[in-house]
């Protein structure tokens, strides 16, 4: 579903010159995966995630999604390709002056969907995320978990095949985190959506991901299967994934964004 070929990212600063945020990285994410990307602060996790839908343009390399290299598409073709890639963020990114229904409808509106069809789709999505009774509410009246559910519904509006999640539970309490993770698993299972999750929370990775990539200082140090372990992980973070919870909880603050 997603293939990155020697993707790298270098930023240019007038004061400090060139900074390589990502060394050449190659990886594959298969259809149906819930794929985690973890790493310490500054490892390049969010940069790599944003390269998948070209919110960040790679300095070099190919980004191939469903067989198409996004890096060579025209702006118009890229906008169309992005309809198959939904994205949710840590801070929800909702419109405060729009109701829940209007926030979800926005994604359909900019895609040119007719109003009658938009309203039907919004109803379906709010039922999916369990917020049908909040359609007329504004974001200021919602809890953090409810806001993230609205963001998930909006990201699914155009029936994407891929959902990118940038720290989706970092702003939530533990109980709410569990409900959001369960929703993501349900979406993966029932809608066959491939999910990529950037997180510093090891419990999130252990609970929902079947595979994980470990980044260190902008480099991919290893890929691991959490369902079919083969040999001992090479990295400290990789080893933590296979240790008892009371041990890897100690690393949560260290492995922060």
Image (cartoon, rainbow, N blue to C red):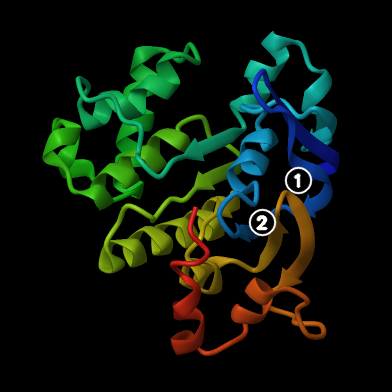
Q: Is residue 202 above or below residue 61?
A: below
Q: Is residue 7 above or below residue 245?
A: above
Q: Is residue 182 above or below residue 198?
A: below
> Does 17 sit left or right of 171 as displayed?
right
Residue occupying the point 30% across, 68% down: 174
Residue 75 rendering spot, x and y as whole percentages: 70, 10
Report the residue marked by disc 1: 1
Residue 38 rendering spot, x and y as whole percentages: 61, 60
Q: Nearer the viewer, residue 19 or 167?
A: 19
> Does 232 sit left or right of 87 as displayed?
right
> Does 40 sit left or right of 135 as displayed?
right
* Secondary structure of residue under mark 1: loop
Residue occupying the point 64% across, 22% down: 15
* Secondary structure of residue under mark 2: loop
Residue 121 rendering spot, x and y as whole percentages: 38, 31
Residue 159 rendering spot, x and y as whole percentages: 53, 35
Q: Is residue 182 above or below residue 226?
A: above
User: Mark 2 or mark 1: which comes first in sequence?
Assistant: 1
Residue occupying the point 46% across, 15% down: 113
Q: Nearer the viewer, residue 53 or 119?
A: 53
Q: Nearer the viewer, residue 145 or 115?
A: 145
> Does 13 sit left or right of 119 as displayed?
right
Q: Is residue 107 visible?
A: yes
Question: Marks 2 and 1, Cα distance to the nearest angstrom?
Answer: 8 Å
Report the residue marked by disc 2: 32
Judge the density around disc 1: few (<14), some (14-19), many (≥20) Cα neighbours within 10 Å. Answer: some
> Quarter of the image holding residue 16?
top right
């Amino acid at each position: 579903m997603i293939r990155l070929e020697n993707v790298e990212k270098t930023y240019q600063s007038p004061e400090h010159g060139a900074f390589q945020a990502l060394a050449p990285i190659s990886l594959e994410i298969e259809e149906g995966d819930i794929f985690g990307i973890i790493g310490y602060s500054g490892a390049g996790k969010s940069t790599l995630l944003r390269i998948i839908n070209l919110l960040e343009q790679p300095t070099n390399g190919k980004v191939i999604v469903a067989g198409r290299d996004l890096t060579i598409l025209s702006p118009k073709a890229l906008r169309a390709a992005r309809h198959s890639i939904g994205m949710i963020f840590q801070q929800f990114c909702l419109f405060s002056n729009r109701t829940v229904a209007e926030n979800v409808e926005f994604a359909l509106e900019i895609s040119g969907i007719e109003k009658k069809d938009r309203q039907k789709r919004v109803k379906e999505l709010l039922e999916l995320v369990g917020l049908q009774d909040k359609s007329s509410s504004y974001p200021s009246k919602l809890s953090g978990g409810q806001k993230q559910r609205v963001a998930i519904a909006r990201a699914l509006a155009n029936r994407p095949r891929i959902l990118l999640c940038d720290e989706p539970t970092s702003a939530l309490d533990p109980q709410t985190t569990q409900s959001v993770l369960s929703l993501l698993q349900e979406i993966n299972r029932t809608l066959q959506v491939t999910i990529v999750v950037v997180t510093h929370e090891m419990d999130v990775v252990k609970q929902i991901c079947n595979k994980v990539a470990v980044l260190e200082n902008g480099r991919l140090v290893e890929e691991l299967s959490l369902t079919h372990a083969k040999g001992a992980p090479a990295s400290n973070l990789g080893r933590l994934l296979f240790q008892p919870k009371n041990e890897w909880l100690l690393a949560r603050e260290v492995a922060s964004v």
